[in-house]
Image (cartoon, helix red, strand yellow):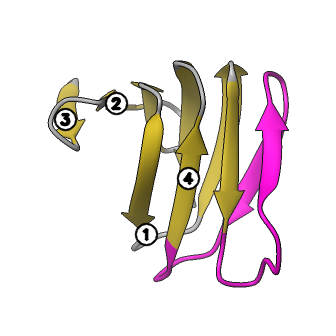
Amino acid sequence: MLTVNEYFDGKVKSIGFEDNVGPVTSGVMEAGDYTFSTTRQELMIVVTGALTIKRPQDTDWITFSAGQSFDVPADVSFAVRVDQPAAYICRYG
């Protein structure tokens, strides 16, 4: 079953599903600044564009480009900056 999610007045959209490994979302973000909260550990994989992030454990902003990935711990908020539209896949732990 697919679930459609929309955040930040439609500037972030994702489609969620479950595969044989577990829950996954595939989404896109328009340019902007966003703050997300987690309830589970997340593995974010950048598909196109770049995501510049700052997690609670980061002292500086870090940019991840297409083909790169990063982890976000459960139960935290993290900031994301997007300079141009970007696509991602998120796996939940």
Residue 76: percent from left, percent from top: 50, 81
Residue under circle 4? Answer: 80
- In terms of sequence position, does the residue under pointer 3 or pointer 1 come before the other? 3
Q: Is residue 93 left or right of residue 24?
A: right
Q: Is residue 26 left or right of residue 70?
A: left
Residue under circle 2? Answer: 17
- In terms of sequence position, does the residue under pointer 4 or pointer 1 come before the other? 1
Q: Secondary structure at mark 3?
A: strand
Q: Are marks 4 and 1 in contact (CB under 8 Å)?
A: no
- In terms of sequence position, does the residue under pointer 2 or pointer 4 come before the other? 2
Name the amino acid type tagged 1: Thr
Name the amino acid type tagged 2: Phe
Q: CA distance from mark 3 to mark 1?
A: 16 Å
Residue under circle 1? Answer: 38
Q: Is residue 16 magenta?
A: no
Q: Is residue 63 magenta?
A: yes
Q: Is residue 69 left or right of residue 73?
A: right
Question: Is there any visible trace of residue 79 in the rendered image?
Answer: yes
The quadrant where residue 13 appears: top left
Total numbered circles: 4
Instruction: Give the residues in magenta.
Output: 55-77
Residue 46: percent from left, percent from top: 69, 30
Q: Name the mark on residue 6.
A: 3
Name the amino acid type tagged 3: Glu
Q: Secondary structure at mark 4?
A: strand
Q: Are marks 3 and 4 in contact (CB under 8 Å)?
A: no
Q: Secondary structure at mark 1?
A: loop
